[in-house]
Image (cartoon, helix red, strand yellow):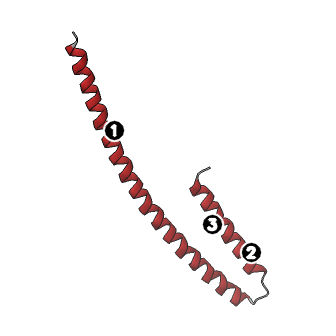
């Protein structure tokens, strides 16, 4: 199971627990709705921030992987060319 799925499950679980706690609290309907709205806004803000961080990290990882792949391709091409030259010179 990926870390992203675990994190998503934790966020959903926390939100469900929060809503359950709010709904069972001894408050008026108006107060309860205000609490739910405030908590939903807070969760949305935090989720947006986490998504932005994840996107930034993914971009960095992508660039790193692309650079490593380019380097590996170049090294492989040089090795193949060297092997061809060595093979052809032994004939």
Classify mark 1: helix, strand or loop: helix
Lower position in the chain sequence, tag 3 or tag 1: 3
Lower position in the chain sequence, tag 2 or tag 1: 2
In this rendering, position of residue 27 left or right of residue 7: right
In this rendering, position of residue 62 left or right of residue 37: left
How many neighbours does mark 3 have within 10 angstroms: few (below 14), some (14-19), or many (20 or more)? some
Give the camera-side residue of 11 and 19: 11
Q: Tell me the mark number nearer the camera, choosing from 2 and 1.
A: 1
- In the depicted structure, whether residue 24 falls above or below residue 70: below
- In the depicted structure, whether residue 32 falls above or below residue 43: below
Cβ atoms under marks 3 and 1 closer than 8 Å? no
Q: Tell me the mark number nearer the camera, choosing from 2 and 3.
A: 3
Classify mark 3: helix, strand or loop: helix
Q: Which residue is mark 2?
A: 20
What is the x, y in percent for residue 16?
70, 70
How many neighbours does mark 1 have within 10 angstroms: few (below 14), some (14-19), or many (20 or more)? few
Residue at 44%, 60% in the rendered image: 57
Residue at 31%, 42% in the rendered image: 70
Give me the disc on residue 83.
none
Q: Which residue is mark 1?
A: 72
User: Marks 2 and 3, how far apart in space?
Assistant: 14 Å
Residue at 30%, 35% in the rendered image: 75
- In the depicted structure, whether residue 28 falls above or below residue 82: below
User: Marks 2 and 1, how far apart in space?
Assistant: 53 Å
Q: Which residue is mark 3?
A: 11
Cβ atoms under marks 2 and 1 closer than 8 Å? no
Q: Quadrant of residue 79?
A: top left
What is the x, y in percent for residue 66?
35, 47
What is the x, y in percent for residue 53?
46, 66
């Amino acid at each position: 199971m990926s870390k992203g799925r675990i994190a998503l499950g934790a966020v959903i679980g926390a939100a469900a627990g929060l809503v359950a706690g709010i709904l069972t609290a001894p408050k008026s309907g108006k107060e309860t709705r205000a609490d739910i709205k405030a908590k939903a806004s807070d969760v949305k803000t935090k989720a947006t921030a986490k998504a932005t961080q994840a996107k930034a990290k993914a971009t960095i990882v992508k660039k790193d992987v692309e650079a490593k792949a380019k380097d590996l391709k170049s090294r492989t091409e040089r090795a193949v060319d060297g092997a061809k030259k060595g093979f052809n010179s032994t004939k």
